[in-house]
Amino acid sequence: MQSAMQPCDVPNPGAEPVTSLRTRMRAWMPVAERYAYLDHAAVSPLPQPAREAIRRWCDEATEHGDVRWPRWAEECEALRQEAAAMIGAAAEEVALVRNTSHGVGIVAEGFPWREGDNVVLPADEFPSNQYPWLAVRDRGVEVRRVPLRDGRLELADLEAACDRRTRLVTLSWVSYWSGRRTDPAEAADLAHRHGALLFLDAIQGLGVFPLDAHQAEVDFLAADGHKWLLGPEGAGLFFCRRQHLDLLRPTGVGWNSVVQAMRFDQIVPDWKPTAARLEGGSQNMVGMIGLRAAVGMLRELQVPRIAVTVLDITHRACQRLRSLGAEIVSDRRSDAASGIVTFVLTGVDPDEARRRCLAADVVLSCRSGRLRISPHAYNDDSDLDRLIDALRRCRAAA
């Protein structure tokens, strides 16, 4: 096993590329002018390219109405292409959805369940990856929530919960509260050994860690764009492996679900042969346009380099926090570390600490009674200095 002090398992391209990427990205993040913003696992601030794209849409929608609608539609299709390239998929396997819950619901509601089937998932999943599965229990589907061991997920425990009636295994690529990162390929192999499919909640990893969904053999994936992808809320991505598309009963269908989408006088349920059939009616175009700009920026910066940079800053954050006496709850082994660091500062109430930090323009979260930071690749040592100073003041005031 590699040392817990190893910052990452992505080959380090050297200090200069990390520094260069951080500086370049920081220039695109206006939020950095005021805040030490360390809360990207909650809701991210928009980068400059996304703001410009949204402003352009707003001006056009105000001044031209739907005259510019065809160009907006082209931008949505460009997002589909960009997203597919980011995850190693084909564009026809990607649907543009409202959020992660929407993507999970597409599978939960559309899957061909039979009474006695079961779905297996860790007990600490975010509600978006629990409620849609719990909602199909009235179809005779058992939901097996696997408890953690001392706060850690063991894939062996997930596997032990599987049997011949397991149809789906679902889990988060990165845990929202602990930051535990799971190898999607290992999770997919686990599911497939039992004849089940894998649904990956990718919201806490997509945009900051590289993924080839086909190589990893992920079956379904969903992620909202408002966290590490740096997009606006209400615009997300869903992936369905091509061979599984006809497995799902289309739900939430609308005028845009059919081949003859623009022929409103032809009412024939001839579903599109792509994942776009799952999108239903009109899109959140402004959200998708903003997300497209953000995704384009991240791809230009190169996601593998972003991963190295994020793991570098979180590794140094852990060192600084330990020097302050904090207990790092997150698993920081190289194959499990992520952009999320959860910690406990003895004698300090986490909610009060968050309030005091926010008053000092240091943004972080509380999850499960612990403090959580989630820096992106543009965060630097000046942000860590402000974090440590704010926490030191919190402890002094406690």
Image (cartoon, rainbow, N blue to C red):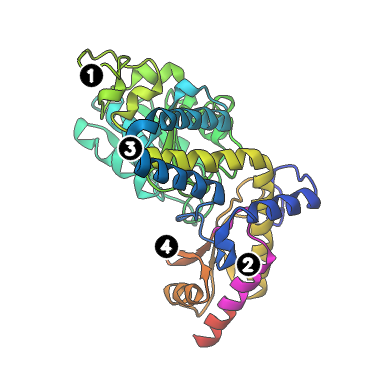
Q: Is residue 54 left or right of residue 379?
A: left
Is 260 located above or below residue 367 in the figure?
above
How many numbered dots are placed on residues in this image?
Answer: 4
The dominant secondary structure in magenta is: helix
User: Which amino acid is tagged 4?
Assistant: Ser
Estimate the spatial distance between the alpha carbons at disc 4 and disc 1, rounded to whole Å: 49 Å
Cα distance, mark 4 to mark 3?
46 Å
Residue visible at 44% across and 75% down in the picture: 355
Residues at marks 2 and 4 touching, judged by CB atoms closer than 8 Å: no
> Do tag 1 and tag 2 residues touch (Cβ < 8 Å)?
no
Instruction: Decide whether residue 280 is among the magenta residues.
Output: no
Residue 157 in the figure: left or right of residue 207: left
Q: Which of marks 3 and 1 is nearer the N terminus?
A: 3
Which of the labelled discs sits on residue 19, or is there none? none
Question: Splitting the image into 4 quarters, where does residue 163 fall?
Answer: top left
Q: How crowded is mark 3: few (under 14 residues within 10 Å), some or many (20 or more)?
A: few
Look at mark 4 in the image and give the residue it sits on. 368
Label 2, label 3: how far apart the Cα atoms are: 42 Å
Which is nearer the N-term, disc 4 or disc 1?
A: 1
- Indicate which disc residue 65 carries: 3
The circle on residue 383 is 2
| For marks 1 and 2 on the same chain, the one whose residue lies earlier in the sequence | 1
User: Mark 2: few, some, or many residues within 10 Å (few <14, many ≥20)?
Assistant: some
Q: Distance between the residues labelled 1 and 2?
A: 53 Å
- Name the secondary structure under disc 1: loop
Give the residues drawn in magenta, as a range: 374-391
Q: In this rendering, would 250 be left or right of 73?
A: left
Residue on which the image places disc 1: 264
**How many residues crowd around disc 4 within 10 Å: few (fewer than 14), some, or many (20 or more)?**
few
